[in-house]
Amino acid sequence: MRLKTIPEDFRVRELLQWPDVRNGEFVVHLVHKEKLSTPEALAMLVREARVDRGTIAYAGLKDRQAVTDQYITIQGRAVELRLANLRVQPVGATDRPLTSRLSSGNAFTIVVRDLVPQRASLMRRSLPSLVKTGFPNYFDDQRFGCLRHGQGFPMRSVLLGDFERALQQFIAEPSPVAITGDVKLKRTLQLRWRDWETCARIARGPVYEPMFEHLLAHADDFRGALEFVPLRQRVIHGFAYQSFLWNRAVSRMLRGGVNSAQRLRLATIAGDLLAWKYLAPEREEKLKVMRTPLFGPEGDGGSEPFRCAMREELQDAGLTRNDFVSNEVPGMIWKEESRDILTKPGDVADVRIEPDEMHAGQVKATLQFSLPRGAYATMMIKRLFAPSWYTQPDGEDGENAERGGPVSGQRTGSAAPSGSHQDEDD
């Protein structure tokens, strides 16, 4: 199975409605992009059309390895831009900047390639049960670029009070998959760790220079040094570990509610997760009304079954509520945030199976569907191909995965973004 062989294999269209205000101050634009992340597309727009970045607002990030359509607002300007991989055109006006609250989700057209005909037929047969009973609303590999790039979870190190280890994970863990120049720098910092004079000499720039100046003056103040890591990166890494724990708590809780014969295994870079083939109607109703928020130390934890599962995950990770207070680092602070445990696709079209022109003797399958905001299309694809939970002998619920650290043997899935490892809307 291959996803995103070419960008055209993964098409995303943002589903968004805004209050239509004629002559509104904020001009709504449709942005069509190919092989560009949302930040890259906006940077190109700023450069080519001389738009002030501060006047641009958007509802969500879209994948780089895809062909995507999304909306932005530009305050006080209508812009038209036509480049090889980026088109921008005005489509309306409103009285406020776009935000995620205006988005109802995304529509997808996805081509899955390199399939044997029997596997494609199995996927087609799996679709009706998925449409009927949905699938767990897990975060997928895009959320865990920190694992793909070998950093582990700096947030866990922060919560455990190991600020030195957290800083190493941020700046001195070379990625095993990236090919950018900072891999060499990170490897050097790793080798010369605690030789702050050398580190300050070789690591230049607005992030590294004040950080190593701080360590030269305060050799063991790693907590203070973490505040020089860009806020955006601290926030992203905080969300990554919060999402990891949510996934595992959901999977743990589902053990008690999904009949063993209906259990499926979803493989992710952060460990295996439990899903279902079918759900009894009464069980589906319970999941629909259950409160399953992302953990925040000041929240109530949601419904009792989920609260118990999350408590056990925190205990297994060696964490207590007090750790969130005593080891607080700005930008790495969790707030309880609601998230549904069950999601269902809408607007599902018949699966189209045809010869794969890029893989001789194989077939490709084209799927069309929509998902609510925050749900992952790649997770839905994994659910369609998921084997029985009992097909792998390596421990229950991905226990072979290292808690809070890199997972060996990365499994097939959607590639996570590199660089800041920021999550995207698919």
Image (spheres, rainbow, N blue to C red):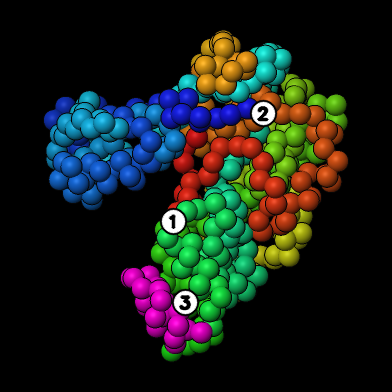
Q: Which mark is residue 225?
A: 3
Which of labels 3 and 1 is toward the front?
1
The one nearer the camera, 40 or 426, is 40
Locate residue 233 relative to residue 344 in the image: left or right. left
Say whether marks 3 and 2 touch (CB < 8 Å): no
Q: Decide which of tag 1 and tag 2 comes sooner along the chain.
A: 1
Identify the main secondary structure in magenta.
helix
Tell which residue pokes out farthest to the bottom in this image: 217
Q: Which residues are magenta?
A: 195-216
The one nearer the camera, 26 or 241, is 241
Residue drawn 20% across the image and 30% down it: 82
Q: Decide which of tag 3 and tag 1 comes sooner along the chain.
A: 1
Q: Secondary structure at mark 2?
A: helix
Which of labels 1 and 2 is toward the front?
1
Q: Which mark is residue 180?
A: 1
Disc 1 residue type?
Thr
Disc 2 residue type?
Arg
Q: Which mark is residue 383?
A: 2
Q: Is residue 136 magenta?
A: no
Residue drawn 21% across the image and 45% down it: 46
Say whether marks 3 and 1 touch (CB < 8 Å): no
State the image coordinates of residue 311 (x, y, percent, origin top left): 73, 55
